[in-house]
Image (cartoon, helix red, strand yellow):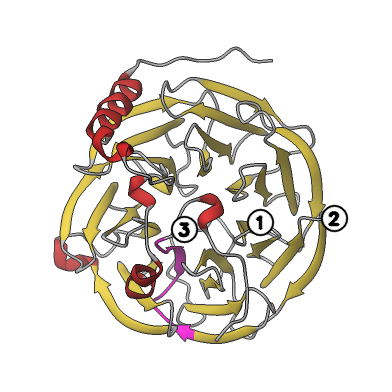
Amino acid sequence: MPPAYRPRNVIAREVSRIERSFAPLRMTALSVGVLAQVTAGQIAAQARLYVANQDDATVSIIDAGSRKLVETVDLRRYGFADNAKPHHVQVEPDGSAWYVTLIGAGKVAKLDRSNKLLGSTDLEVPGLMTLHPTQDLMFVGRSMSAVNPPPRMAVIRRSDMRLVDEIDLLFPRPHGIVTHPNGQRVYVASLGTNQLASVGAAEGEVQLIDVPGQAHGFVQAAVSPDGRWLAVTAELTDQLMIFDLSDPTMPKLAQTLQLPDGPFEPMFTGGGRWIFVTCLSANRVAVVDTKNWKVISVLEHKSFAQPHGIALSPDGQYFFISNRHQLGGAHQHQGGKPTGKGTVVAICAATRAPVNALPVGNYAAGMGTPLKVGKAIPPPGSCH
């Protein structure tokens, strides 16, 4: 077992400070983290889907309930350049703010619900992000577009967008990233080596997990709502790898499933029964049953063209699939080769039936919605 790496204790001090600031709130009967507490009525009012259009320096905002385009935010109006390259979006659980990584600009930006720019953090080739479920922290990996990105995970304080720390992960090209629902671990997957990092959210200690086999090319990860399973896409071997999190510190490989060409982003349904996976090179979406760990369906749609990102509606009933519609391979982030406008396809999670497709900007990439934490996400039911 590789030795644990322990960076400076900046994160621990930040977590301690944040916990003290929330101490009066813990005296109430709330059982879910205060940053993630959302009522059913609030969900309806805040159900916005944010889509990063990487070639256009814009973000499309879609009403997740009506599945209609609300507006398109042009990031150039904030002073960002044409090649800002928005890549991934995360949203506060209460919908009050959203974050977008800008590969070309080298920034992570924060905007409020009215799309006012609240702040930004300078970061070399920022890629995918994950929010801590209860603390004022976010964790950021690196874009696969860089030849040699920093081998570090960034830690940002969300309230003021201050860069708290950068944790050395001891492997190259950290890309896929997800936080455990209990907030104690962050999992980072390497695009360049067959390794995962399990990082302590409080202390920042790093445990490396070696994964056997040929080069996998890990793209993105997801954790089941109950915190039991970690799903990681392997783009080079066309696999979905399932890790047992009985010991959250050290994920253990439990299942390996063969998927259509180029599995990219996975996501569990509420309740954790199914995993939907975008398969970018195959122009399909695979559905995995977690009861028997089998691929039970491969979805097709005329608007699936390099399906990249995946997001779940806050009520747990719809998946949204972003599609690049570009020529070139999975890692050609320079874009500029459109075969058509980007699209977002809505799928009923319960029936696995596509509902509608919306045109958005060029090179539709990562997406985000305001989701509650873990088991609080409703399981699929009837779509309406």
Nearer mark to the viewer, of 2 and 3 = 2
What's the residue type where badge 1 is placed? Gly
Nearer mark to the viewer, of 1 and 3 = 1
Lower position in the chain sequence, tag 1 or tag 3: 1
Q: Quadrant of the N terminus?
A: top right
> Which residue is identified by label 2?
292
Cα separation between marks 1 and 3: 31 Å
Q: Which mark is residue 272?
A: 1
Q: In this view, does 245 lie to the left or right of 140?
A: right
Image height of 175 relative to 309, above or below:
above
Q: Is residue 56 visible to the viewer in this orientation of the structure?
A: no
Kindly identify the residue that appears in the image at 52 percent across and 85 percent down. Answer: 357
- Pointer 2: residues within 10 angstroms few (<14), some, or many (20+)? few
Lower position in the chain sequence, tag 2 or tag 3: 2
Image height of 214 relative to 43, above or below:
above
Name the secondary structure under disc 3: loop
Answer yes or no: do the residues labelled 2 and 3 have beta carbons within 8 Å?
Answer: no
What's the residue type where badge 2 is placed? Asn
The x and y percentages for residue 76 are: 19, 66
Nearer the observer, 125 or 203? 203
Q: Quadrant of residue 19?
A: top left
Name the secondary structure under disc 1: loop
Q: In this view, does 168 lie to the left or right of 180?
A: left
Q: In which quarter of the image is the C terminus?
A: bottom right
> Which residue is identified by label 3?
333
Cα separation between marks 2 and 1: 13 Å
Verify whether residue 58 appears in magenta: no
Kindly identify the residue that appears in the image at 71 percent across and 59 percent down. Answer: 273
